[in-house]
Image: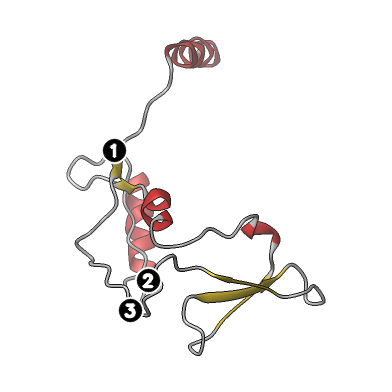
């Protein structure tokens, strides 16, 4: 059962970092937040971030990240923070907006219904 897998994941973490959640569990729902919109108010995005392999941050330059595509590539340096203050207070109580699933459109629902009915018979 899926609940057995979730229990195994929970028990596999010695420090308690693995916290399984089952989608559809009404007693402990999975909440999805709009982190992209929320973080865009505080930070500049790194364009094409997935093509870079090396990142460097330093306590000497807070809010600045240096990155390279490859070890012999030139260093690109940007300031991530949009706010110039060194300490930006972000409260743990100040969460992004909750995102809700839009669901499947009627065409796709009907397609899945028809094709799952064929595979069962």
Horizontal side of 77 relative to 116 (left or right) equals: right
Toward the viewer: 23 or 72? 72
Q: What x and y, as percent, mark residue 110?
A: 46, 10
Q: Secondary structure at mark 1?
A: loop
Q: What x and y, as percent, mark residue 109?
A: 44, 15
**Gap between marks 3 and 2, in whole Å?**
33 Å
Toward the viewer: 4 or 90? 90
Report which residue position mark 3 lands on. 87
Bin the neighbour count of mark 3 within 10 Å (Cα to Cα): few under 14, some 14-19, many 20 and up: few
Bin the neighbour count of mark 2 within 10 Å (Cα to Cα): few under 14, some 14-19, many 20 and up: few
Q: Which mark is residue 24?
A: 1
Horizontal side of 115 relative to 26 (left or right) equals: right
Q: Earlier in the sequence, mark 3 or mark 2?
A: 2
- Seen as rendered, the residue at the extreme front is 84
Toward the viewer: 92 or 105? 92
Q: Which mark is residue 13?
A: 2
Decide if residue 1 is in sight here: no
Decide if residue 59 is in sight here: yes
């Amino acid at each position: 059962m899926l609940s057995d897998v979730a229990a195994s994941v929970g028990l596999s973490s010695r420090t308690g970092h693995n916290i399984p959640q089952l989608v559809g569990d009404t007693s402990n729902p999975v909440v999805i937040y709009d982190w992209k919109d929320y973080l865009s108010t505080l930070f500049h995005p790194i364009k094409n971030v997935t093509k870079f392999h090396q990142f460097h941050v330093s306590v000497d330059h807070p809010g600045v990240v240096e990155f390279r595509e490859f070890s012999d590539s030139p260093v690109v340096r940007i300031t991530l923070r949009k706010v110039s203050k060194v300490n930006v207070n972000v409260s743990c109580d100040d969460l992004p907006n909750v995102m809700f699933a839009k669901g499947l459109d009627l065409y796709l629902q009907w397609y899945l219904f028809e094709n799952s009915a064929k595979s069962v018979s």
